[in-house]
Amino acid sequence: MANLLRWLPALLIPMVIGCGAASNRVQSWAQRHGGVCDFQQERVAVLAQRLVTHCGTGPHDIDVQVLNTDVVAAYSWREGRLFVTRGLVATADDHELAAALAHELAHLLSDGHLKGQVAALTGSVSAESDAESRADLVARELLELSGYEPDAMQRLLVKVAAASSNDSGLSQQHLRRRIAKLAPERRTGN
C-alpha cells in the first residue's frame, strides 16, 4: 500500500496544473448528472481530508463535491475531482461514505490510465473488473490507514447493489463478485 500511496502526488500534480479544458468537461458532466449541491458538503470534505492526508498530497489537489441526485454513486476524474451523490451521502454512514471516497481515490492511485474519463463506484459492464476490485482493495487499506473501518467497503457495496437493483443482471453480478472478494474469509485465506 505504501508503494501505491507514494505515487499519488506524481499522478495529481500534472492533473491539476493546466487542466482548464478538462475542468470544463468535468463541469459539463457534473451538470448532466444533477449539478453540484451543498448537501452535507462539510461532512464529505472532512471525511475526504482524513483520507487524503494518508495519500501524501495536499487537500488542494483533490476537489470533492456532492452531486444533486438521488442515485447512490460516486465518481472520480483523473484531474483529481471526486463526486459523491446526495443519494449516497444520505444512505451511507461516515465509514461507508469514506469507503466510497477511498475507492475513488484508489482509482487515482492505481488506475492512472483513466485519461480524463470518469470512473464510477459501481463500475460498468465494460469496465475491467480487476480495476474495480483493485480499487476496492486499495480503498480498504486506505480506510484502515485513516482509522476508518476497513469492512465499510464491503458494506458500502452491499448498499450500492441494493440501490441499483434495477440495473442489468451483469452489473449486479459484477457487484456481487466484488463484494465476495472483500469477504473476511477471502482476506485471511481461510
Image (spheres, rainbow, N blue to C red):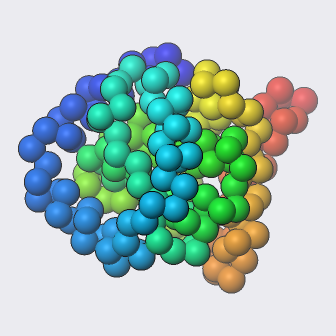
Q: Residue at x 66, y 62 (%)?
A: 90
The image shows residue 57, relative to residue 46, as above or below, that is above
> Can you say whether 118 is above or below 16 in the image?
below
* Residue drawn at point x = 31 percent, y = 59 percent: 117
Give coordinates of residue 174: x percent, y percent. Answer: 65, 63
* Residue drawn at (14%, 49%) of the image: 19
In front of the other: 165 or 24: 24
Position of residue 120 in the picture relative to residue 61 (left or right): right
Q: Is residue 187 left or right of residue 13?
A: right
Q: Position of residue 129 (x, y in %)?
A: 56, 54
Q: Is residue 61 visible?
A: yes
Residue 175 lies, in percent from the top left, at 68, 61
Compared with residue 83, is residue 8 higher up or lower down, i.e. above or below?
above
The image quarter in which residue 62 lies: top left
Q: Is residue 133 above or below residue 60?
A: below
Left or right of 169: which side holds 69?
A: left
The picture quadrant where one finds residue 153 is: top right
Q: Is residue 77 left or right of residue 96?
A: left
Question: Observer-nearest residue: 38 or 113?
Answer: 38
